[in-house]
Each structure stands twice: as structure tokens, then as C-alpha cells.
Image (spheres, coloured by chain):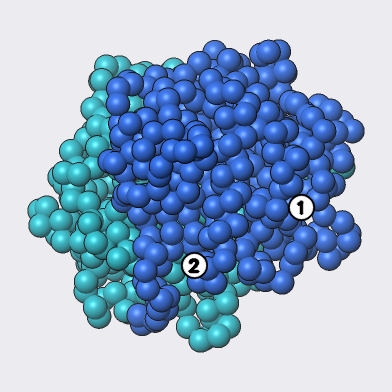
Chain colours: A cyan, B blue
Amino acid sequence: MADLRRDPIVGRWVIVDTDHPNKPEDFEYEQYTPKGGKCPFCYGSEAMTPPEIEAFRYPDTSPNTPGWQVRVVANKFPALQIEGNLDRRGVGIYDMSNGIGAHEVLIETPYHNKDIPDLLNEEVEKSIAMTCRRAQDLIKDRRFKYIMIFKNYGPAAGASLEHPHIQIVALPMVPKNVMEEIKGAQNYFDYRERCIFCDIIRQETQEKERIILENKYFVSFAPFMSRFPFEIWIMPKRHNGYYCHTPAEEIPALASILREVIARLKKVFPNLSYNFIIHTSPANGDGGGFDGYHWHIELMPKLTRVAGFEWGSGFYIVPTPPELAVQYLKEAK
Amino acid sequence: MADLRRDPIVGRWVIVDTDHPNKPEDFEYEQYTPKGGKCPFCYGSEAMTPPEIEAFRYPDTSPNTPGWQVRVVANKFPALQIEGNLDRRGVGIYDMSNGIGAHEVLIETPYHNKDIPDLLNEEVEKSIAMTCRRAQDLIKDRRFKYIMIFKNYGPAAGASLEHPHIQIVALPMVPKNVMEEIKGAQNYFDYRERCIFCDIIRQETQEKERIILENKYFVSFAPFMSRFPFEIWIMPKRHNGYYCHTPAEEIPALASILREVIARLKKVFPNLSYNFIIHTSPANGDGGGFDGYHWHIELMPKLTRVAGFEWGSGFYIVPTPPELAVQYLKEAK
């Protein structure tokens, strides 16, 4: 018989197939190998992108020329636009606003074909440090309520460009999913006077059944209430609500654990597509007054397709229990 | 500049690209043509499925033999199992339960390759009438709190079998997404003393900008706050919270509007995959005491892939405004 498991943060139930769990070889996922070639994000093509917003570069190199390690540019086809004031208004019973926001692209490496596991730890550190810098810069703009940082890798994950990149979107309202997590964390805090994420870390590090890897500052595990098979969360051990407040000395540990879990996932599932999303407290204290959130990364391999049942219910069917997924990920050194 | 639009029921924001909207020919979607052949759902293969739960049949034919028009069987690989009592328990800070429920499959037609638009109206009526009967039967079981009825058509929509079928799942708890809609409708009712869905119908039928088709009992429209391009809702004009309370005389009108909107969608997008989900009040008064919900169908064509941004935020980017989608659907006769 399957397990039903409840997410203690947002109250979502998932169905976990503990009876006939899928092994890695049972997944028919869409494999992705970059076609390669030269693109606007490649070294030497800097003039083909919108102007550089910020970059880590070798000394004595100029913006919009080669010499960079990571490079941030405006998205050429932004979902939201930076100019103007927010204008919210009603349309009968509906509400709307003009599309104010920012949409930036962080090019993670000069190499077109290198995914995170193919990079050096120092290179991944630079991407992470740059996402923090951009988030710190964007939240200075008081029109923005939330900075969303995420990566789509491979077409199955929604990536339209091959060259590895992270997207940074500044939103003029706190997204619904984020508010739900914050409210859930607040309800727990009101009841127990503890951070629910800290309690999750405590239980997971004691039980060890779902831990994949840990280092001095971070822990990675397959959550008890995973929505997707082989879903992985990475969480700072020290309580911290804001991703962009991550201390500089913790960034190498974050780069290392992120790189290693993706490497292991891709060892189990060659040529895998995936998404990861940084979940953090809203900018500018816009989280409804609650400051006890705990930032973390949610990493979702694209092994299955979301169907009608999931869309309709928010009830996810997970064909591989997280405890079993962890066994495969631990063996994949 | 894009529009930001807010769902007045659940408070979700979407980004609608009104500047450079996608035309139908701009979508690179996965086209699906059934391979055909004979499967366990085909006429004459009745012995290959679990035993028939219920069917509409020609007189003097026996269960589990040919002679049926629509046929309901247990899912051979059920997500939940019908035997046993619900056993909820805690695991440290987590909650879980055994996987009690029901998972049935309604085979819509003896023909392997016929999608809804290829059927006669009378045939679609039989499927609809049967989903109502099954829902009425399943809610008699007091362990079940919600009956979820949905269809996945095509592999991009998560269908693993080609032969057209609808799934019926009885759940031992009301799903999170459903509770959110009910709470949203209740908040609106508390404030305005009116049903929000009735108000949506009133505004849409007055403005006419997003109406695709209507008949005596039903209206179909592209919602103002669509999450997906060419998303379509079908709603009963008369206020009714429970799908399974649909009066018999309204069923032909429902079959006709469902068949026609799918036919038009597939005229605009040949060989399209899609999902539809029936949103209804929970069984047995389990909707938190509020009885003012309004059942409807949400139909989602699979034209785009959901990426990291949507997963992270619940903020959807809609490349075709619903007002424009309606123009294409109206022309596609």
C-alpha cells in the first residue's frame, strides 16, 4: 500500500509509492545533450547580448568584452520591465497591474557545454556570489517585493537556451507559493516557538535516512514530503531567512554541496534536465511581518511529467520514496 | 509592457505577454497521434482489465464482454487502495497516513483512436453521465472526502495509455488546491454575499471579450487570469456546488460544449495533448462548512512546459492573452 505524507510547511499531501517503487532504470525521461556551437552567451559574443550589468572579470578587461568568469546581462526578452511605476487597478471583479520588475540572466561560465558538475568549485562559487550581489542590489529598489533566483537546465526543464545560465527576476509582489511557505512557517512558530526548517534539519540529521551529503554549513536531503522523484533540498544549518545574507565564508561550502548533488543526480540519470529554485524571505520585510523563514534550495530533476491529477489536486504521486532515492544518490560517487 | 493579473479566487498573479503575444504558429508543442492497435481497453479485450465496476451496455450483454458504450474498471495500478481503514499518524514533526482511496478508469469509447471531438454527442453524454454516477456512488463511502475526476490526453499531458479514458480518484482528504479555491470563494462570499463564480460569469457574459461558446446551461471562456495559453473553463450558468448534482437535462448541453471546445482547440492546434479537471465541492460536506462553491471544468492544452520560475513562484507567464486566444478559437469552426 502507498503512503500518504503531509508537507508540514504548506499542508500539501503526496502519495508515495512504497509498494512498487520505481528504480532509476524505470524512468523514461527525456535525455538532453547540448548541441554545442557558438551562442550570444559564449566568450567573444559579448556584443550580442544587452549591456553587462555586472561581471567577475580578470583585471584590466573591459565590460562587454572577453575576460569574464561570470557575467550578468538583462534578459533580451524580459517577462517584466524595469521602467515605470507600479500601477495597480481593478477591472470589474478582477485586479491587475502593469508589468514592472527586473529580469536578469547570469551566464555561469564562458563554456557553452559545461553544466555545474563540469565546472570547478571556484567557478560555481563565483556564480553563487554573483546571485547574492544581484539580489542585494535589486532589493534596494523599493518597488520590488521579491527576488526569485532559479535555474532551468535542459529543454524538459523549460530552458530555451543551451548555454548554462541562472535567471534572476525581481517581482513587484510576493508570489503566492512563497507567502504560503512563510505563513506555514509562521503558524508553526506561533505554536512551537521554533523554526520548522531548523526542526526538519534536526530530525533529518538524527534519523540520517534521507540525508545525501552534509558539510560544515549545509545539509542536502531528499525531503520526506518530496513532490517529485529524486527531489533534493539544500539547506543552511545556521538559521538564516535571507539567501542574500549568506556570509562569504559559507559560499564555498554551498558551491561544493550544490555541485556534488547535481553530479550525483547526473551519475544516476545521465543527461538529465533539472530545475532549481532558491526559496528565500521576501525583500524589504514584505513577508507579512514574519521574519523567521529559513532560506533553502529546492532541486527538481525532470523525470516525470505533471499530469491532470497533480494540476487538479496539488496531490503529487511520487513513484520513488525519498528514502530509496537517497540510497542511489549515496552510492553514486 | 506585460500585464500582471490576479486570480480573484486564490490570489495568484500571472504575467500576460500583451506586447509580443504568441500566435498559434509560434508554439512548438509536442504533437500526438495514437499509434493505434489493440489494447486492454479495446472492444473484445474486456478480460484483460480488472472486473467491470459499472458500464452502459446494450440490452442482453454481460459484464466483461463486448456490448458496452462506456465502461468503468478499477485501475490496474492504483495510486490508492480501497481496502482498510484510514490510519493517520505522526512521524516526528511529519504526518502520514496509509494510502486508502479508490482509483477507477472510465473507458470512454470502444474505439482506440477516437478522441472526444471524434465521438458523437450522445457518446460524450454517456461518459459524463457515468462520471456523475461513479462520483455519487463513491461519496457514499464516508472514508472519502473528495472525488477527483480528470482526463489526461496524450503523453505530453501525462497519459500512459492511448485509449481514451477518464480517471476517477476518491481521496481520503480534501486536496490543498481545492481547499484554497473554497476558502477564496468563501472570503468573497463573506465580503459581498455573492458567489464569485456567478460574478465571473456575469462579468464575462456582459463583456463577451473572453467568451468562446455558450448554450442554455453552460458557458465556456478563456479566464482573465489563465495560467496557460489557450486555457479554457466551462461553467454551469446555474449556481451548483456539486458536479455530481448536475441535472440529467443539462448533461447533453455539457457534452456538446466540452466536445466543441476541444474540437476547436484541436483545429487551432492539430494533434494537441491536453488535460481537463473537474473542480467540485468536496463530498460529505467536508469543505470546511462552506457550501457556496460553484463546480466547473478547467481545460489545459499542453503548449508550453512549466519551468523553474512557475514552480518556484506560482507566478505563471502566459505568452498569449486570453482575449487573443478567444479570437482564434471563435474563428476555428
Disc 1 secondary structure class: loop
Tell me: A111 left or right of A312. Answer: left
Name the residue located 58 percent from the left edge and 15 percent from the top edge: B267
Q: Relative to the observer, which residue lies in front, A62 or B326? A: B326
Q: Which residue is mark 1?
A: B240
Residue A229, horizontal then vertical, whole percent:
30, 52
Q: Residue at x 82, y 54 (%)?
A: B195
Between A31 and B257, which is closer to the camera in this rendering?
B257
| Quarter of the figure with residue B254 | top right
Q: Is residue A250 above or below residue A38?
A: below
Q: Can I make out residue B125 in this image?
A: yes
Look at the image and tell me whether residue B22 can be seen.
Answer: no
- Left or right placement of residue B188 versus residue A262 in this view: right
Residue shown at 39%/64% (left/top)? B82
Question: Image quadrant of residue B262?
Answer: top right
**The numbered mark 2 sits on a residue in which chain?**
B
**Please, is residue B119 above or below residue A23 in the view?**
above
Q: Position of residue B227 (x, y in %)?
A: 61, 39
The disc labelled 1 sits on which kind of residue? Asn
Q: Is residue B266 above or below residue A231?
A: above
Labels 1 and 2: the sequence-earlier one: 2
Q: Which label was assigned to residue B172?
A: 2
**Vertical placement of B301 versus B46: above or below?**
above
